[in-house]
Image: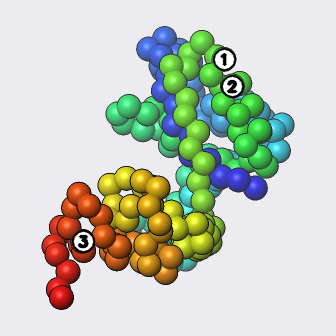
Amino acid sequence: MEHYLIQLSYTALAWQQQIDRTTDADQRFTAVRKLIARLGGSFARYHFFDGGEPPTEDVPPFVVADKFVGIGEDDVIAIVALPSSLAARAFSMAIAAEGGVKSVRLTPLLGIPQAVQAMGMAKDAIAMAGYSAPGGAATSWEGATPTTAARSGERGVETTPHPERPLGRRGSRPRS
């Protein structure tokens, strides 16, 4: 399953209808739960003060089901699990097609283990390709031979001369 952050904004008319007609939270969730389930996914549930931190009398444990209502630019914020980017796109299209939705954004999310795996892949790819981008000290993006630093995986230290700027970090000249 892939996870997505949903950020959605309603029109003024949609807010007015919800204010006038909503009497039960489950009534609000039923239709969108069915849509997500039809696409093979589900909402995330958020457990606060449940197991990790001991609750106090002032803050008992509680669960937020499905989504949050935001204050500011985004009216609804949620995380959903969907089986593919195609299912996520279908969900986004179905939501955006409704007249009361001003905007909807889905952001793909990675769990920390997957992010660490992606970092390792990036490091290996940089080292093997001798890649650099404009703005850093390495110059392989200009067509130069990859630097020793880029080949070793260390970033930000240039070891081959460049005719237009000094060597080293932060513009300092290397010691002889």
Say which amino acid is labelled 3. Answer: Leu
Disc 3/disc 1 C-alpha distance (Å) = 55 Å
Where is 136 relative to 92, above or below? below
Figure label count: 3
Residue at position x 70%, y 34% in the image? 89
- Disc 2 target residue: 93
Question: Observer-nearest residue: 56 or 82?
Answer: 82
Q: Measured from the top left, where is residue 25 in percent x and y?
A: 59, 36
Return the x and y of residue 24 as percentages of the image width and height: 60, 32
**Up/down of 157 relative to 81, above or below:** below
Q: For the residue labelled by badge 3, is the local secondary structure a helix, a strand or a loop?
A: loop
What residue does disc 3 label?
A: 167
Q: Which of the numbered marks, if any, corresponds to residue 162?
A: none
Instruction: State the CA–CA distance, disc 3 to disc 2.
Output: 51 Å
Specify whether 37 is left or right of 66.
right
Amino acid type, mark 1: Ala
Q: Which mark is residue 97?
A: 1
Q: Residues within 10 Å of mark 2 (few under 14, many from 20)?
A: few
Judged by depth in the image, the label closer to the viewer, 3 or 1, is 3
Quadrant of the image occupied by residue 157: bottom left
Looking at the picture, tell me which residue is in the foreground, 156 or 44. Answer: 156
Q: Which of marks 3 and 1 is nearer the N terminus?
A: 1
Examine the rendering and report whether any part of residue 18 can be seen.
no
Relative placement, left or right, of 30 versus 21 is right
Q: Percent x, y for residue 105?
A: 55, 34
